[in-house]
Amino acid sequence: MQAFLDTRHALGECVLWCERSRRLLWTDIPASTLWSYEPASGRARSWAMPERLCSFALTGSDDRLLLGLASGLALFRFSTGKVTRICDVEPGLPTRINDGRCDRQGRFVFGMLTEGDDPQAAAGGFYRLHLDLTLECLPLPPARIANGICFSPDGRRMYFADSTDGAIRWCHYNPCSAEVGAVHTLVAAGAAPGAPDGATVDAEGCLWSARWGAGRVLRFAPDGRLLQTLLTDAPQPTCPAFGGPDLATLYVSTAHAGMSDAQRAAAPLSGAVLRQALEVRGLPEARFLHA
């Protein structure tokens, strides 16, 4: 895969393509920074956030993002740089917001990450922010590192993972009532190299999973069969996203957190955002549709 920026991020994450503004967005979590890049002009920009930005979602307005900050949810305006707090999430627990994506009806679904090294620390939940800004805890198993949240093209499957567990799961998801149903395993723990990190779904309904520690992105069929392997030249890919004018370019954020100087020298693209042209196409990113 090809790197298109010289910047290297300790923990690049949540790469998303905005098909309206034709720019790529992502975050460097420990640097509390939001990044954007416009391939047509080569222009890159960044915005400092008030705390770690762990995930985010496009909204109905190109001037606004929904932010998943470490301690809670907020709205951000590009034109003013203003951050407006919505709510805290799991205050008092040793957790922070981690991965998140909007469902096909525009509600933001996200999970938590347990910080620290205490194996007895409480695992975090999965949540859904409704369009009226009410927050709901979903009836899903708690996760220590919630990841891989994305939805099938028809919105009737929600995919998710716990990176420490290693399995990729899916549940029935009613796109009208938002009811969450039975949980199933798509990819069993240990059945694929690396740990499941961020994920996205292409127009054919197949899931692309970034594999932390394995230096690859894997494409799985809806029945769990491995269809394609894409090597990333960076051992810690974090999140894939389809972008470009025809949504046929796969962008992948990566990280160098925890790597030694020797490991970084051996994998100099670690921390870069990578891209690869593909024959398969993606879907426009779902948007948070709060009025």
Image (cartoon, rainbow, N blue to C red):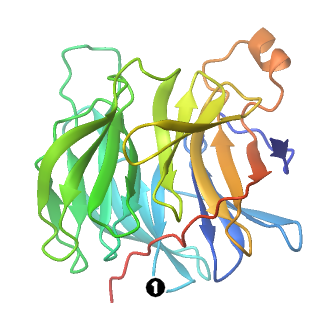
Tag 1's secondary structure? loop
Identify whether 257 is placed above or below 273: above
Residue 1, position as x, y percentages in the image = 80, 41
15 shown above or below 114: below
Instruction: Name above or below for residue 60 compared with residue 2.
Output: below
Q: In this view, does 62 lie to the left or right of 102?
A: right
Task: Tell me residue 58's x, y (percent).
Answer: 49, 72
Residue for point 81% across, 44% down: 7
The residue under the point 39% across, 55% down is 150
In the image, is 267 to the left or to the right of 53? right
Q: Name the residue under label 1.
A: 60
For residue 207, above or below residue 81: above
Instruction: Judge whether residue 53 can be spotted in this image.
Output: yes
Horizontal arrangement in the rendering, residue 232 relative to residue 165 (left or right): right
Figure quadrant of residue 211: top right
- For this orientation, the residue located farthest to the bottom is 291
Q: What is the x, y in percent for residue 37?
A: 76, 64
Q: In which quarter of the image is the C terminus?
A: bottom left
The spot of residue 42 in percent (x, y) is 88, 66
- Amino acid under label 1? Gly
Q: Is residue 143 left or right of residue 202?
A: left
Question: Could you say which is closer to the camera, residue 65 or residue 267?
Answer: 267
